[in-house]
Each structure stands twice: as C-alpha cells, then as structure tokens.
Image (cartoon, rainbow, N blue to C red):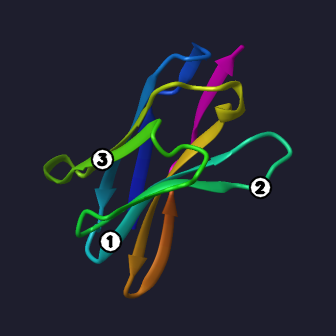
C-alpha cells in the first residue's frame, strides 16, 4: 500500500501563488508516474501535471507556463508550484501515484485551493 498526504492548499487572490506538497510512504516500488489532478465543483476530475520516474513532465494546456511539477526523490515527495493563479484554478487538488506492475492507483485525500477574484 501507498499513503499520500497533500498539504499547501489555501485561499489566495488572483495572480498569487501557492506550492502544494505530496508526501508518500509505504511500498513505493514500481511507481512510475506521479501527478496532480484537480476537481472543481460540478466538474470531472482532470489532470493537471504528471512527472515520470525518468523525469519527463506533462501539463494540461490550461496550466502550462504557470505551474511546475517537481519531485524530491530522497523524501518521496512531489510538489506543484503554482504561479499566476486564476479563479478557474479553484478546485480540490489530488496527488496521484501510479504503479504500473501490478497496476494500481493511489490517491491522496485532496487539498482545497481557492482563488478569489
């Protein structure tokens, strides 16, 4: 099993910044993709950014140039640095770790990000 604990959410004005953290513990073998997803009220959960074991990153078009995903492998922690926040970024942000063999998805409990206009 893998346990994920997010932190760093909060209330910020438009144009502001936040840094989310996700600390992982447990059996982390074969975790090949780590990422952040978000879910706004009344909407489906959507991908924000991912980082692969090899370091490749992927971003949703809506956050490119504003958000950066990174990791500290020694601390089993990933981060999401968010700049230029917009009201439409308001959502619950979830950390996700994907094990490919055997396949398993692990999710954190979520952290609320609220951007006021």
Q: Nearer the viewer, residue 47 or 2?
A: 47
Quadrant of the image occupied by residue 88: top right
Rendering coords of residue 95 (x, y %): 48, 51
The reply to whether callout 1 and callout 3 are in contact (CB within 8 Å) is no
Q: CA distance from mark 1 to mark 2?
A: 24 Å
Q: Earlier in the sequence, mark 1 or mark 2?
A: 1
Query: Of the residues tagged 1 and 2, which is closer to the observer?
Result: 2
Rendering coords of residue 14 (x, y %): 62, 16
Quadrant where the N terminus sits is: bottom left
Q: Earlier in the sequence, mark 3 or mark 2?
A: 2
Query: Of the residues tagged 1 and 3, which is closer to the observer?
Result: 3
Please report the bounds of the magenta region as a residue range: 108-117
Residue 31: numbered disc: 1
Residue 105: numbered disc: none
Instruction: Tell me if mark 1 has few (under 14), some (14-19) or many (20+) residues whose alpha carbon lies within 10 angstroms of its own.
Output: many
**Residue at the spot of label 3:** 70
Rendering coords of residue 2 (x, y %): 38, 62
Q: Earlier in the sequence, mark 1 or mark 3?
A: 1
Residue 74 in sight: yes
Quadrant where the C terminus sits is: top right
- Give SS at disc 2: loop
**Residue at the spot of label 2:** 44
Left/right of residue 60 with respect to residue 67 in the rendered view? right
Q: CA distance from mark 1 to mark 3?
A: 15 Å
Left/right of residue 38 with respect to residue 22 in the rendered view? right
- Give SS at disc 1: strand
- Give SS at disc 3: strand
Q: Is residue 32 above or below residue 79?
A: below
Picture residue at 45% right of the left edge, 40% below the top: 65
Instruction: Tell me if mark 2 has few (under 14), some (14-19) or many (20+) residues whose alpha carbon lies within 10 angstroms of its own.
Output: few
Picture residue at 51% right of the left edge, 50% below the top: 108
């Amino acid at each position: 099993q893998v346990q994920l604990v997010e932190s760093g959410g909060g209330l910020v004005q438009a144009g502001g910044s936040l840094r989310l953290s996700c600390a992982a513990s447990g059996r982390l073998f074969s975790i090949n993709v780590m990422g952040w997803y978000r879910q706004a009220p009344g909407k489906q959960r959507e991908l924000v950014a991912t980082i692969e074991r090899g370091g490749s990153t992927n971003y949703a078009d809506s956050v490119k140039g504003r958000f950066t995903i990174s990791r500290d492998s020694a601390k089993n922690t990933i981060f999401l640095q968010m700049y230029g926040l917009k009201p439409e970024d308001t959502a619950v942000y979830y950390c996700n770790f994907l094990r490919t063999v055997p396949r398993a998805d692990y999710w954190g409990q979520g952290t609320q990000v609220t951007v006021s206009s």
